[in-house]
Amino acid sequence: MSAIYNKFYINGEWIPPAGRPTLDVINPALEESFATISLGNADDVDAAAKAARAAFPAWSQSSIEERLEVLQKIIGGMQGRTAELATAISNEMGAPMNLATKAQVGSGIGHFASVMGVLSNYQFEDVRGTSRVVREPIGVCGFITPWNWPLNQIACKVAPAIAAGCTMVLKPSEVAPINAYILAEIMADSGLPAGVFNLLNGDGAGVGSAISAHPEFDMISFTGSTRAGKEVAIAAAETIKRVTQELGGKSANIILDDVEDFSAAVTAGARACFNNSGQSCNSPTRMLVPRARMAEAAGAARTVAEKTIVGSPLDESSRMGPVVNDLQFNKIQELIEKGIAEGAELVAGGPGRPEGLDKGYYVRPTVFANVNNDMTIAREEIFGPVLSIIPYDDDDDAIRIANDTDYGLSGYVSGEQAHAQTIAKRMRTGMVHINGAGGDFSAPFGGYKKSGNGREWGVEGFEEFLETKSIIGYDAA
C-alpha cells in the first residue's frame, strides 16, 4: 500500500494544497508506486512565497548563535532519522542502501556541518577607508532541486540559506520527494521560526515555473538539466532576480602516461563513472588515455564493468542499482545504440538489462573504447553507467579534447603530481580532481559554460546568499 503525502509545509504548518491532483512516486527497482504526493500550483507557490517574505525581516536579523543552534538541531534530527532518509532515497531513485546511507544521507549531513563552520568564522563587515562594507542576507530564495542526489542538493542550498539569514521555499523533484518531506518534519522540530522554510511538491510546469517567475523571490537556485536551467533563467529574467544554476556535465578524466599505476587509475575512473548508476552531473564519463595504451585501458575498464554487481538496492552485495525511471532507461538505451551505430568499440555491457534482471530499470555497465570526441556518446550527457574511452596523442591534444565540450562542470587528472597540477590548471572546468581526490565540502562546487553559474559549498556557496552593501562615511571621524 502506498504511503500518502498530501500536505505542504507552509508558514510552520502542514496544510492541504490549493488543488487536488496527485502523482505516484515510483520505486525504479520494482516499477511500482510506493508513495503518492499532492502536486501544487501557482496558488501554493504564492502562499509559500508570502510566508517566506513575512518571516524574512525577523530571521534576517537573527543572531549567529541562534542560526547555529537551529543548524545543530537539524543535524541531530537528520542523524536520528538516517535510516528513514536512506530508505526513502533508495525507494525513490534506486540507490543501494549502503550508498544511500553513507553517501546520500551522509553528504546531506556533511553540508549542514560544513556550513556551521563557515558561519562560525565569517566576517559580515569590513572597513575600507571611511566606508563599511556589509554583507546581508539576499532575501527570499526559491529552490528547485533534482532527484539524483536529492538530499545532498537540498542541503547545499537550504543550509547556507538558513545560515545567511534568508527565508526559502523548496520544490524538490517530484521523482524523489519523500526525503524532502522527512527533512521538512525535521525542520519543524528544529526551532526554526514559521515561514523561514517552506516545502511544496509539484512538477516543473506547475510549480517550478511559478517559483522562477514569482516577484517575491529575490533569488532562485536551480540544479538540474541544462535545458530546464535555460527555462528557469528566462522565467526569472522579468523580475531581475539572482539565478544560480548547477547544470549538466560531460567531465573528462585524463590519465597521463606517467601515472604511477595506470591500471589502478583506469579502474578508479571506471568505478567513479558507474557510481550512483552513472547519475551524477560530475561523473567522469570521458576517459582520455594515451593512444598507445588504449587496449590496456579498455581491458581494465572492461574488468570493472564485468565485476560491478548490479541488483536490488536491498541486496548488500549490489554496487549499482537501477536508474531512476523508464524515461532515463530508454534514453540511455538509445544512446548506447547510438554509440554502436557511430562506430565506437563496445568492450563491455551494451543494450538491455543485465542478465537475470527482467524487472526494474537496470542498465548494464557499459564501456566504449576508441571513441571519437565528435561522437554522440562523447557530446551528450548520458546520465547513466556508460564510459567513453578516447585516445590522445600528447598533453596539448588531451587538453584540446577535454575542453572541446559544451560543458565545464568537473574534470579529473591522474599522473605525476606536478604534471597533473599543470594539466588541471589548463582544464576549463569549475573543479578538477587530481589523483583520485574525493569531494571537499569546503571547496566551491560549480561549473563553466553550459554547466551553470554561481557556486555551492564552502565560503563561496555561502556568499551566494548574501548581498553587499557599502555604507559610505560610516567610519568617518
Image (spheres, rainbow, N blue to C red):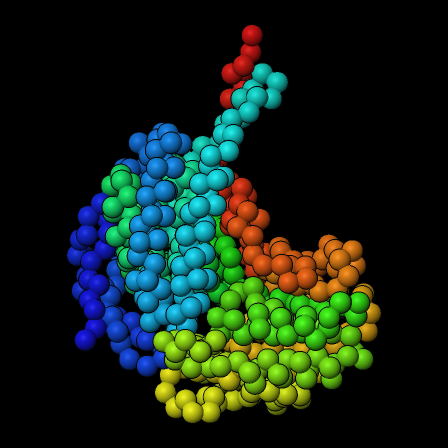
Q: Tell me what residue is drawn at x 46 percent, y 81 percent.
A: 310
Quarter of the image where one finds residue 329? bottom left
Residue 217 against residue 17 in the figure, above or below = above
User: Picture coordinates of residue 418 (x, y %)?
Assistant: 78, 55
Report the front residue among 295 and 35.
295
Report the front residue among 409 and 443.
443
Q: Tell me what residue is drawn at x 80 percent, y 80 percent.
A: 292
Report the front residue among 331 and 34.
34
User: Picture coordinates of residue 412 (x, y %)?
Assistant: 66, 63
The answer to whether residue 378 is visible is no
Q: On the picture, is 139 further left or further right than 8?
A: right
Task: Look at the image and tell me in which quarter the N terminus lies.
Answer: bottom left
Quarter of the image where one finds residue 162? top left
User: Picture coordinates of residue 250 (x, y %)?
Assistant: 60, 68
Q: Tell me what residue is drawn at x 45 percent, y 51 percent.
A: 110
Q: Tell me what residue is drawn at x 77 percent, y 61 percent.
A: 416
